[in-house]
Image (cartoon, coloured by chain):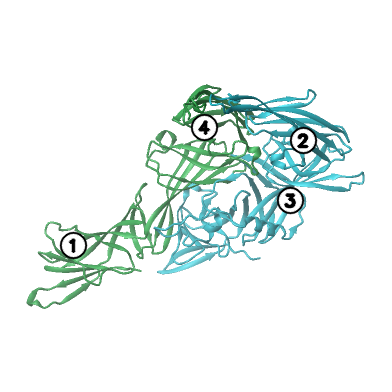
Amino acid sequence: MKNKIFLIFLIFVLNLFAKVDLVTLPSREKVQLTIYNSADLTLVRDERILTLKKGENSLQFSWANTLIDPTSLDLIPKQDVASINISQLIFPPRVSELGLWKIESKFSKKIPFEISYFTSGISWEAFYIGTLSNDEKSMELKGYVKVINKSGEDYENASVRLVVGKINLLEMIRVLAKRYPPYGTPGYLPPAPLIEKERGVEMLKAAKAVLAEAKEKEIIKEGVSEYFLYTIEGTENLPDKWSKRLLSFSQKDIPVEFFYKYEEERYGKNARRFIKFANDQNHKLGKEPLPDGLIKIFKYTNKEGNLSYMGSDKTKYIPIGEKVELDLGESKEVKIDTKLMDLKKKNFVFNKDGNISGWEEEKIYKIKVTNYKNLPVKVEIKRNFPHQYWKIEVDKNIQWEKYDIGSVKFTLTLAPFETREFTYKLILFEGDRRY
Amino acid sequence: MKKVLIILFIIFSISYARTKLVALPDREISYIRFDAPYTAFVEEERILTLQKGINQVDFSWKGVNIDQDSINLTFLTNPDKLKLISLSYPPEGNSLIWEIYSPEGGEEKVRISYLLSNIDCLYTYKIVVDKNEENINFTSYIILRNFSGEDFEKGIVTPEFGKTFETSTKNEETKQILIYQKDGIKFEKIFVFDASRMIWDPETAKENVGIPVYFEIKNVKESGLGEFPLLLGKTRMFQIESSGSSIFLGEDNLKYIPVGESFRLYFGDSRDIVVKQKKMKDTKINIRKNNSGDIVLYDTDEIIRIEIENFRDKIAKIEILENISDEWDMEESTHKYEKIDSNNIKFVIDLKPKSKEIVEFHYHRRNLR
């Protein structure tokens, strides 16, 4: 037990000219952590009961060796709001990591208060494990969240909430936590830097910290403003330097489309494996947006349930209703060969000096697609052109579309072990032939 | 820690014997105004016990940064009778000596004013949006930072805006003081896609491309504010959620906002609004050539297509900012737009929940060389 946050409640009683200080240590009634994943920030709400005396009361709050941002300190009475006036928070001279609230009360009474502040050092991340069926048509998806406490403070029986979303921050909480005096000194208030150095490394180290075994708890999800809030059922103990993993959701039989992409400029000469699904009801999902995180994909290899590892991808945040494409890396199961078979220059035009001012280039490409798998495959081939002045003629039985001003996309479905070839003729207009 | 000292030397001119009597008059009250950055204008009132004849008042300071040329002395009790004969700066610095002529002995209330450095005020704001996103609670704090070297036991502080209040302030103390709180303030939430700064095709980006979201608030009576200008300060924004507790939405700096003006605070990015922009056409037309056949003048024919999708379950007001360089004419546009300046246009779209809309505009850039 090494709580570093202390609350001292000072009651000044004027007794025959002698000023007697009575000190009480109000204990923590409830604590709620709202942890962000886009920034190193956690909003802590700490509920304590104070016995107020009529008149002026002082509450001293100290937080040595923690990562609390003093400029975020707030004290809110939970009842009798109209009779309690908290007008000042004082950071006394030459004392660091300590604040003093002046509380004016109209009566003597026990009042629950909420102390709130930002701390850095607590983070969370999402990750997923997907398991494909043998026929690659469906997937079981499990989403997890991991909470990592490196804040310097132990949080016991804390209700934990996780925020999915990107907030705007002007200064890093970690830097504000170390700044003394809390608001700097006049004439010189350097903005705390926002660049998060080596956070990834820290996160990785933290990830290797001991994982507490957690029983499966429900995580309640709701949208708030532009963010999504995950509330973990019940309370959690989060000692300093510990991490905790919780199951966020689990869904079986999600229909997925397994397919291959080929685009030389983007992926090189190899085909890449992709899985496509959508975060919607048709895919037995769509109850909540999926936070960004690493997803690992496995596949059942036999009836005994043995698995093989297919690959992993970092997913972006996926809103409800949005489609998802997971890139599982290069594949040797499907091979795509592109060859330039013929090149002709023609229809030259000349200017009045006799120089070439325009021409057409006719290129014939042959594309050979081979499926080495015992399952049918879908292949998307994107071809990018050097500019937008072009015309294309494609073999009749091939499905294709113009993707944008400088590219087309071919879509093929191949039977197991099938090889297919097709050709297209690309005419590029150069110089005056463009207009 | 009192570092500003007033020593009253009274020189009896009788028989030219310079006998000094020393009195240390206490500071009665101090008015502290924050009119300039990092500096306070201090007016302090003290009672001087003056003798008949010439009195020498020595005003000195140590460890504080007073602008000595700003020091001024005003008589409050007998302004007509008393005369300030001279003011001199001794060679050792950080002090000055007033010579005051008094026709008769007695107490005189004086006001000494000066500019004091290393004491100032910052402003911070807190915004709490209610559960239904209808109103906000607006709170403003002053952060009094006193690193001047001087304590003020009874200071009447006048901030740049807001009401004057009384407080004490010790050297090296920082104090957060609540100065304004108002509930029920109206606001609007606005999503902004700026095509000249943001990624056109979010699918090509490794990270999520969020659409920046702003609160727009008017500093006018109708929206619940409009009492005084708002000064620069960090604003932290929160929103109450279904459990009655609140979450932190983000923070932004509020700039100086005069009464009557509106302001925007950027709090975070929405990933439930997805904007994808594509160029569908960009060709040269109306080509003019010189005698050598080189193109000397042309126009362009360009089409921009923007797909906006709202995955939220609430309506979203989205601003689309587009930049068109050079001289141009709009041929057609699926939506009305506002011309911000010669090269910038703005579409404002109210997008229904869970819906998609396509904005397409077709323009010619003219007389390009």
Amino acid at the residue labelled 1: Glu
The residue mark sitting in front, 2 or 3, is 2
Secondary element under disc 3, as helix, strand or loop, is strand
Amino acid at the residue labelled 2: Lys
Residue located 68% across and 53% down the image: A147
The front one of B303 and A207 is B303
Chain of the residue displaying label 4: B
Q: Is residue A420 above or below residue A53?
A: above
Q: Are discs 1 and 2 both within one chain?
A: no
Among numbered discs 1 and 4, the one appearing first in the sequence:
1
Where residue A162 sits: x, y (%)? Answer: 65, 48
The residue that mark 2 highlights is A339
Tell me, for residue A246, which label it has, or none: 3
Q: Is residue A344 above or below residue A50?
A: above
Q: Are discs 1 and 3 both within one chain?
A: no
Q: Which chain is green?
A: B
Amino acid at the residue labelled 3: Leu
Amino acid at the residue labelled 4: Glu
Q: Are discs 2 and 3 both within one chain?
A: yes
How far is disc 2 from disc 3 in space, using C-alphas? 51 Å
Among numbered discs 2 and 3, the one appearing first in the sequence:
3
The residue mark sitting in front, 4 or 2, is 2
The residue that mark 1 highlights is B108
Q: Are discs 3 and 4 both within one chain?
A: no
Q: Quadrant of the C terminus of chain A?
A: top right
Chain of the residue displaying label 3: A
Where residue B185 sits: x, y (%)? Answer: 47, 37
The residue that mark 4 highlights is B322
Q: Quadrant of the N terminus of chain A?
A: bottom right
The answer to whether B7 appears left or right of B142 in the picture is left
Mark 1 near mark 4, Cβ–Cβ under 8 Å? Answer: no
Mark 3 near mark 4, Cβ–Cβ under 8 Å? Answer: no
